[in-house]
Amino acid sequence: QVQLVESGGGLVQAGGSLRLSCAASTRTFSGYVMGWFRQAPGKEREFVAGISRRGGSTYYSDSVKGRFTISRDNAKNTVYLQMNSLKPEDTAVYSCAARANSVNIATRARDYDYWGQGTQVTVSS
C-alpha cells in the first residue's frame, strides 16, 4: 500500500507559477511510474504529465506541454509538477498517482494503482 500526499496548490494570477509536490510513503518509490492528473468542476479527470521510474522519460498532455515540467527525486520519495505560465483553464484539483508493475507511462487514470487526495489550483484572470 502506498500513500500519496500532495501539497503546493493555491491561488495564483494568470501567468504565474506554482510547484506541486507529491510525497509517497514507500521505500520502493523508484519502482513506480508516477503521474499527475487534474479534474475541473463538471469535467472528467484528465492526464497532465507522467514520468518513468527513474525519471529518464516524461510525457505531457498537449494542453500543458511547454509550460509544465514533471520531475522526481527518488531519494526523497517525491514527484513534482512545476507549472509556469498558468492560465485560468488550468484551474482544477490536481492529483498524483502511482502505477505499479509497469515501466510505461500511462495516460488513463484506470492504469494507476494509488492516488493522493488532491490539491486545489486556482488561476485567476
Image: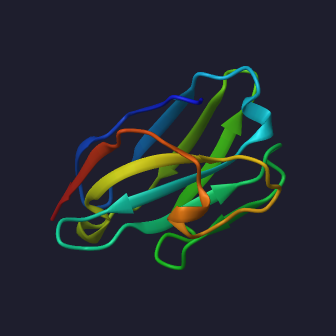
Q: Nearer the viewer, residue 118 or 20?
A: 118
Q: Residue at x 17, y 72 (%)?
A: 42
> Left or right: 1 with respect to 4?
right
**Left or right of 114 on screen, residue 31:** right
Q: Residue at x 72, y 46 (%)?
A: 100
Q: Residue 46: x and y, percent?
A: 43, 69
Front position in the image: 74 or 8:
74
Q: Residue at x 25, y 73 (%)?
A: 43
- Above or below, 27 against 80 in this view is above
Residue 57 appears left or right of 77: right
Name above or below for residue 95 compared with residue 124.
Answer: above
Q: Quadrant of residue 90?
A: bottom left
Residue 29: x and y, percent?
A: 72, 31
**Residue drawn 18% across and 65% down?**
41
Residue, far bottom: 62
From the top left corner, tell me how far across and down residue 1 is, in percent: 59, 29
Percent position (x, y) of residue 27? 73, 20
Foreground pick, 11 / 95: 95
Of the 4 image quadrants, the one containing the C terminus is: bottom left
Give the answer, above or below, for where 84 lies relative to 28.
below
For the image, the number of numbered tags is 0
Task: Identify the image's colour scheme: rainbow, by chain, secondary structure or one colour.
Answer: rainbow
